[in-house]
Amino acid sequence: MLDEKIEEAYINKDLVEKLLHTLCEQKSWLSRFPEREKKIIEMRFGLNGEREKTLKEIGEIFNICKERVRGVEAGALRKMKVMYRRAVIDSERQARNRRASNAWRRVKRRR
């Protein structure tokens, strides 16, 4: 039991869950992951109808040690973080381009 509490301390669950649910609104993001990574994330955080499972439970399902599950989870979360940052940057770039385009149209109309 103490072991499970220690393993949970490695992750800021609230932040991760907020990020995951934001990302999973875009189903295509999670579908970019290999099947095993996707299932591990779904099981770990209770997505798509799964109940939250411990590292040990997931390890038993995939026949790998819980440290390997932790590694797969960490890698998937890093990928999601990069995807999220890229989406934010793209969104900001599109907004900036729209503003510039609208400003240019206003200038052209005044001529």
Image: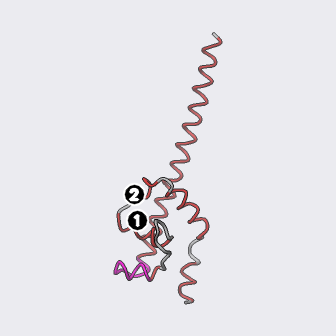
**Label 2 amino acid?**
Ser
User: Quick check: 48 left or right of 15?
Assistant: left
Report the coloring of the rendering: secondary structure
Q: Which residue is at a point 55% across and 45% down the rendered structure image?
A: 89
Where is 33 relative to 108, above or below? below
Q: Secondary structure at mark 1?
A: helix
| Residue type, numbered disc 1 | Lys
Could you say where residue 12 lies in the image, as x and y percent from the top left?
A: 60, 70
Please name the residue shown 56% across and 65% down the image. Answer: 16
- Distance from disc 1 to disc 2, alpha carbons, whole Å, reads 7 Å
Which residue is disc 2 drawn over?
31
Residue 109 drawn above or below residue 34: above
**Residue 71 percent across, percent down from the top left:** 44, 72
- Please name the residue that numbered disc 1 is placed on: 38
Which secondary structure, mark 2? helix
Q: Residue at x 51, y 55 (%)?
A: 25
Residue 11 covered by magenta stretch: no
Picture residue at 49% right of the left edge, 55% below the top: 82
64 in magenta:
yes
Q: Pointer 1 and pointer 2: residues touching (CB < 8 Å)?
A: yes
Which corner quadrant of the image does residue 107 belong to?
A: top right
Q: Badge 1 local density, few (<14 within 10 Å), some, or many (20+)?
A: some
Q: Which residues are magenta?
A: 57-68
Q: Nearer the viewer, residue 60 or 74?
A: 60
Residue 22 percent across, percent down from the top left: 55, 57
Question: The C terminus lies in which quarter of the figure?
Answer: top right
Instruction: Answer above or below: position of 82 versus 52.
Output: above
- The N terminus is located in which quarter? bottom right
Residue that lies at the very extreme toward the bottom in this rendered image: 1
The chief SS type of the magenta part is helix
